[in-house]
Structures are given as C-alpha cells and as structure tokens.
Image (cartoon, rainbow, N blue to C red):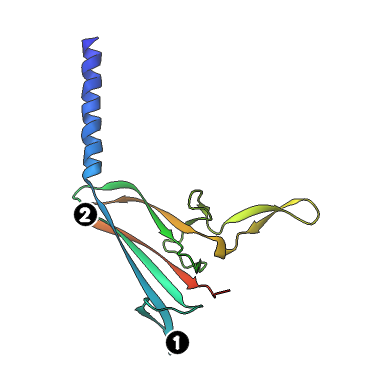
Amino acid sequence: MNRVRSARVGWIAVLMIVLSMSLLAEVKVELKASKIVVVNGAEQRQPADKATPGAIIEYVAEYKNTAKTAVSNVVATLPVPPGMEYVPDTAEPAQVMASTDDRNYSPAPLKRSVRGADGKMVEQLVPFSEYRSLRWKLGDIEGDSSKSVKARMKVKSAK
C-alpha cells in the first residue's frame, strides 16, 4: 500500500513539474496589418491605418515562444474584423479552419446543408462574408522560435 501511494505521489510530483514547466513557457503574439496595393503590376505593402471599401488588408500573426523549452499544441486564431470579409485562398498555412460563430471550426471552405427546391438536402458553400475567424493548428514551437499565420481580408462596402 505504501509503495503504491509513493508511486502515485511520485507521478503526481512529475506531472506537476511538467505542467509548471509548460506554464512557464510563454507564447507572445504580434499582429501586423498591411494594406496591399498593386503599383505597376507589383504588390506593395502600405500602412493599414486608412482603408476604403474594397481595400485588401493582410494580417500576419507571429506566435513567438519566448521560453527556452518547446511549447506544444499551439493553436492560432485570427478574427475576421467587423466590416471585413475573408479573401479565399489567402490563408497561410493553407490548412486553415474557419468559423461563423467563433466556437465551431471546420476546414475551409465551409459548407452547410440546405434543403433544395426539390426538398432534398444539398451541400452549399458558406459565403466568405459569414466567416468570423480563422484557426490553424501550429503544433509545437521550439524554444526561442516562432511560427506565423496570415490571411487577407477585404473591407466591405457600406450598405
């Protein structure tokens, strides 16, 4: 009995050390936004502080592990700001998930089942204007390393 209790206490101590080490690891996120304009056929990045309807804004979020030890199971989430719409096929890494409610995520492009005119259920693409956030599974980030995600959004027209 004492040997079993000692083993449990030992495992609990190891588990607490591992958990505290992962809590010590810190991932900082830096978000940059640039307006994308085409000048003489070439893309240029400009400050995104002023944008008109139809402008394309590229968001880049860098997830930097500032600790010496690796961090596991890092998930990056990039909201689609109000008044903007995700521009399809601009997400990097390309294996992106999307959500229309910021809770449930599925691989993009999102699809939903709707009842057709004939009464049968058919699958339709969800309009990109309904996307509220994007998510990537970044996995592990080694100590003093970083991983980035990016996507472009279009400023919607005022209606």
Q: Which residue is mark 2?
A: 66
Q: Earlier in the sequence, mark 2 or mark 1?
A: 1
Disc 2 packing (10 Å; few <14; some 14–19; many ≥20) = some
* Callout 1 amino acid: Gly
* Callout 2 amino acid: Thr
| Total count of labels | 2
Residue 151 bears which disc, if any?
A: none
Residue 79's quadrant in the figure? bottom left
**Distance of mark 2 from mark 1, alpha carbons?**
39 Å
Percent position of residue 90, x then y: 47, 68
Q: SS of the residue at dot 2?
A: loop
Percent position of residue 5, x then y: 24, 15
Q: Is residue 142 above or below residue 130?
A: above
Disc 1 packing (10 Å; few <14; some 14–19; many ≥20) = few
Percent position of residue 69, x then y: 21, 47
Image quarter of the C terminus: bottom right
Percent position of residue 154, x then y: 49, 72
Q: Is residue 122 left or right of residue 5?
A: right
In the rendered image, the residue lying farthest to the left is 68
Q: Is residue 20 above or below residue 78?
A: above
Residue 13's quadrant in the figure? top left
Q: Which residue is mark 1?
A: 41
In the rendered image, the residue lying farthest to the front is 159
Q: Is residue 103 left or right of residue 31?
A: right
**Residue depicted at 21% across the width and 17% down the height:** 6
In the rendered image, the residue lying farthest to the bottom is 40
Q: Is residue 31 visible?
A: yes
